């Protein structure tokens, strides 16, 4: 029993912390392109993890980033969204809401687990496994500058700008 619990714990690491190096990642986006952390070397970027496309809170969050995308771009901050939805679902979600940033389809939860955002959640007293809503701000040197736990979907852009000191 103890070895089983250890395997479960090891499979779902804790979220990364400020000052940790950002893990290498690579994934397919809604455009069919493969992007990786190497594409953002020497740049500031935000990786935001969200549970599901086309759900109310996730849509509000994505639309907030879309509506303020120019401010983020002008500040030199790239945005990358990640969920374990399929590329097909990302195509529909990005198209429906005209999202100008990439959404990585992490269907195998590799990136989610590397950042420590996949694990046990509770909703209405029911426990289940899923993606925790979190955002990591990565600096030009590839280190986590700030972790935004439970971002405010309606004000997420402001949280990102503030996290980068802008």
Image: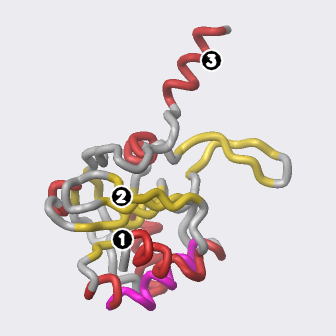
Residue 16 x/y as whole percent? 44, 44
Disc 2 target residue: 145
Disc 1 target residue: 164
Instruction: Check if mark 1's residue and mark 2's residue have beta carbons within 8 Å.
Output: yes
* SS of the residue under disc 2: strand
Residue 143 x/y as whole percent? 28, 51
Residue 60 x/y as whole percent? 58, 80
Q: Tell which tag, 3 or 2, sits nearer the viewer.
A: 2
Disc 3 target residue: 5
Residue 11 relative to residue 129: left or right = left
x 60%, y 48%: residue: 130
**Which mark identifies residue 47?**
none
Residue 126 appears in the rendering: yes
Question: For this rendering, which residue is in front, 58 or 136?
Answer: 136
Q: Which residues are magenta?
A: 58-70
The answer to which of marks 1 and 2 sits earlier in the sequence is 2
Color encoding of the figure:
secondary structure
């Amino acid at each position: 029993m103890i070895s089983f619990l250890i395997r479960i714990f090891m499979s779902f690491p804790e979220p990364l912390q400020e000052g940790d190096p950002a893990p290498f990642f690579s994934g397919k986006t809604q455009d069919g392109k493969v992007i990786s952390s190497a594409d953002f070397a020497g740049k500031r970027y935000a990786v935001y993890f969200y549970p599901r496309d086309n759900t109310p809170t996730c849509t509000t969050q994505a639309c907030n980033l879309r509506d303020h995308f120019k401010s983020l771009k002008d500040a030199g901050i790239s945005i990358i969204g990640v969920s374990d939805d399929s590329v097909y679902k990302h195509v529909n979600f990005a198209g429906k809401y005209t999202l100008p940033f990439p959404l990585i389809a992490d269907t195998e939860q590799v990136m989610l687990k590397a950042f420590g955002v996949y694990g046990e959640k509770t909703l209405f007293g029911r426990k289940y496994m899923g993606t925790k809503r979190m955002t990591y701000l990565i600096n030009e040197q590839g280190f986590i500058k700030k972790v935004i736990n439970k971002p405010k979907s309606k004000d997420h852009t402001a949280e990102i700008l503030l996290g980068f000191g802008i």
